[in-house]
Image (cartoon, coloured by chain):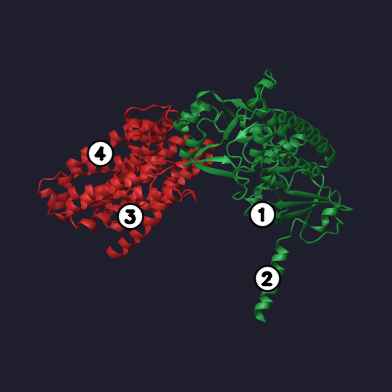
Amino acid sequence: MKNPSKKILLFLTLLLFFLAYLHVNNGSFGLDFDVFFKSIFNFDENQQQEIIFREIRFPRTLMAIIAGAGLSISGLLLQTFFKNPLAGPSVLGITSGSSLFVAISILTGFEFFNTDFGVTFSALLGAFAFSLLILFFSYFVKSAVSLLLIGMMLGSFTSAIIQILQLTSHSNQLKVFTLWGFGSLQQTNFNQLFFIFFVFIIGLIFLTILIKPLNLLVLGEKQAQLLGLNISSFKIIIIAVSSLFAGLITAYCGPISFIGLAVPNICKQLFKTQNHFILIIGSALIGALLLLFCDLIIMYIEPIMLIPLNGITALIGAPIVVWIILKKF
Amino acid sequence: MRILLYLFCFVIFVSCKNENFKSKDLKFSFLNKYAKNIRFIKRPTYTEVQILNPDKNSIEKKYALAKDISNLKIKIDVIPIQIPLKSIIALSGTDIGMLQKISCADKITGILNIDYINNSTIKRNFSKNKVKEVQDLGQINPESLLGVSSTITYSGFGNPPSNEEKLAKIGILCIPNYDWKEIHPMGKAEWIKFYGLLFDKEEQANTYFSKIEKEYLKLIKLAKKIKEKPSLISGSMIGDSWYMPAGESFNAELFEKASSNYVSKNSKGTGSTAYSFENVLKDFQHTEFWINPGFKSKKELLQANSKYQFFDAFKEDKIYCYSHDMNHFWEMSAIEPQKVLSDLIQILHPNLNPKKKLYFYKRIN
């Protein structure tokens, strides 16, 4: 294994298994593999430990991995697409779009939107609509910083609408939405994992056809076109895939900040490559590791104080963003 | 020397700011039996009411209540209130219940939000535009309250509303209410005496209080005879934690008096205790009763968190909540603690009186 990237990827994979083990092992009793596998493949709902593994620990661990990986991939796609290291689903307003549509669905109380599918559909729709909006603005705004400012303005705009909706909503709906907004890996249950995993895999399949165009795009749009890339259809696919990851995770975990922005930058520094095959796998692994790590911190300090997920991701992510700004702008 | 001077100033400052509960005035007061956050002192020409902040352990406000306040000789920190009040803006649900019990619901001219109101008098007056919705006291334009009422009662949180000063300048007085911080169920109810004083219905308030006190004590006597103590959990998941009333809280007191084995009875504090879902499931999965999850149906419970299905109380339909009419509960439970206790005894020990119907509570189906 002469390629250092492969060594790093292998190391990150092993580290991911280790952290996932620590994560699923954390709780009032240790991990028993026999009970763990029974809880997934031969579940007996009269066995308390099996319930705990199946409904609490396993979904939380898997969501940390999926959310961390998905948000990081989404961020990487946006950063390559907009050629901007500060692009990410939360910065460009894509997460805000998801939040707005979820707010509309939860706070207006339509029956359809109170289902899992309804909330997910809203989040995906919101993410996709706001991604298209950003794409539209990107035709007029050439400066990377200006586009980020537009993303921030979209965030402020959605916040204002959400505040108005909150003022007029019922207290129960308000409670549900407020708690969703804190971000959490604990709200999913075992049955939802199948759907989440299914959508995630669809996103990954689309990614495989994006790797080559992404590598071409690094050379510049004109160069990529000369090499046969259909830029307009590629743009729609990249926006759709990025929205799919961001929307899916926002629907089930709430808006999680900084992961999508910070992880692709860490990944690029670590691998020092523009090969998107490596970058996508690397970002997915680092994102999963980072979110597992953040959630482990929450678990360990839980007896002393309760910290929302977004609090930890911001504490870790914000210094990284400052570092990126100092280095690249 | 300078350090000593600073130290002296600091001691003076602290001793002035935190006026202790153990005031020499106590000997003139008629002592409350249960309420800890309000004190009444009878003076020759007025009644002094002291509102105590339970978190800061100090007096937050002092009021001098008199029919004629023109010649009152009072200290600068005492606020005069001419009684009886002609109207009031009642922003807490418990105020509404208390005012109803002294036949003053029609004096309410302002409320927080009509969606949270059960009282028929207020609803009727609201439809006639005689009652104003305040929504958020901190955000409201003070001028819009002119002509509504000159007195506002609100749930105290330690800090006055941000525009209290502006409201005071246009003659509107904000009175904090800490009945919700009372630990003893009868302590909450005892705040009715304050509303009795404000509307010059002291006797009516005292009579009502004595009546419910007798009923409450009778129920406690009855519950004490019961040897069986079924296990009980309370609360539900909020975000990632399950919040249960702490062992020294108002609810824990009621659970204990209703002869139950409340699972969080040994936890410290008067607020709530947070548990992880895993700990609740591991330690309390087989608890017999689940009280106050805050939902109206099992469907709603499952929508909020499908993991609730694993609790024995869920499987055996032993979940109860104050969901006959939640607004009614919030308005009346503080002033009818004997009915809350009666419901809890009935839920936990249905064989005592099998035909008795629940008043506030309802089985969740």
Circles 4 and 2, Cβ within 8 Å, touching? The answer is no
* Residue under numbered circle 2: B10
At mark 3, the secondary structure is helix
**x, y (%) of residue B265?**
61, 40
Crowding near the residue tagged with mark 2, few <14, some 14–19, many ≥20 C-alpha atoms within 10 Å: few
Q: Which residue is mark 3?
A: A148
Q: Position of residue B31 (x, y in %)?
A: 81, 47
**Quarter in which the C terminus of chain B is drawn:** top right
In this figure, which residue is indicated by the disc labeled 4?
A203
Mark 2 and mark 1 on one chain:
yes
The chain drawn in green is: B
| Crowd tier of the residue under label 1, counting other residues whose Cα lies within 10 Å: few below 14, some 14–19, many 20 or above | some
The x and y percentages for residue A32 are 35, 38
- Front of the two marks 1 and 4: 4
Type of amino acid under label 3: Leu
> Relative to B58, is B315 on the left or the right?
left
For the residues labelled 3 and 1, the Cα–Cα distance comes to 41 Å
Residue that label 1 marks: B164
Q: Colour of chain A?
A: red
- Residue B85 vs residue A203: left or right? right
Q: Are marks 4 and 2 on the same chain?
A: no
Same subunit, labels 1 and 4: the answer reads no
- Which residue in the rendered view is the most extreme toward the right? B44
Cα distance between the residues tagged 2 and 1: 28 Å
Circle 4 chain: A
Residue at 65%, 29% (x, y): give it: B344
- Residue at (30, 35) in percent of width and height: A197
The verdict on a common chain for dots 2 and 3 is no
